[in-house]
Image (cartoon, rainbow, N blue to C red):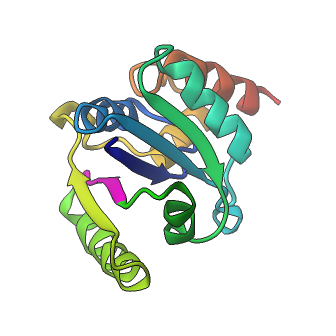
Amino acid sequence: MKRAIYPGSFDPITLGHLDVIKRARAMCDELVVAVASNAPKGPLFTAEERAELIRSSLPADCGVRVETFDGLLVEFARQLETFVVIRGLRAISDFEFEFQMALMNRRLEPRLETVFLTPQEEFTFLSSRLVKEVARLGGDIAAFVPAPAATALRQKFAR
């Protein structure tokens, strides 16, 4: 079985993330979307809330498994015995960081290969950070995130 891991914060999941998930899933038998706890990043949603938002945004039985993890991605990959990592690149500015991360991961785990996917052009400007800012200021985010994420963001910022 060919399996790949698509790790990220997904705080919250965007339509760009869903686009990468769909295209990555076509390349493997099973895709594991790995939600990083990322406590230092100060996420708006807990890791489990983010995982549930992803699950509720995907069709049932679509060959995508959603899990949370804490710590190094290479350790998570070893646990799953999965050594293909999918990363999304929106712009040139993403590349330098992602390239360094891929090289570090490969140094820590030589079997690990990173595949970079770009989202459809209509999603290249999207980031979870920007979506949260628009939602916080009361803007309409329906065109940027799946419905479960839009609802969750509205609830978070209504408090």
55 relative to 112, above or below = above
Q: Residue at x 68, y 69 (%)?
A: 40
- The residue located at (32%, 34%) in the rendering is 29
Numbered range of the magenta stretch: 84-90
When the figure is inspected, residue 80 is found, relative to residue 61, above or below; the finding is below
Q: Picture coordinates of residue 57 (x, y %)?
A: 51, 21
Q: Is residue 37 magenta?
A: no
Point 61% across, 28% down: residue: 53
Above or below, comparing residue 124 to residue 36 in the picture: above
Quadrant where the N terminus sits is: top left
Asked if residue 12 can be seen in this view, the reply is no
Magenta segment, principal secondary structure?
A: strand
Pick the front one: 121 or 71:
71
Residue at the farthest bottom position: 107
- Residue 84 seen anywhere in this rendered image of the structure: yes
Comparing 149 with 65, the one in front is 65
Using the rendered view, name the quadrant where residue 17 is placed.
top left
Tell me what residue is drawn at x 28 percent, y 38 percent. Answer: 28
Instruction: Give coordinates of residue 2: x percent, y percent.
Output: 31, 44
Q: Is residue 88 magenta?
A: yes
Q: Is residue 89 left or right of residue 57?
A: left
Relative image position of residue 137 (x, y in whole percent): 60, 35
Q: Quadrant of residue 119?
A: top left
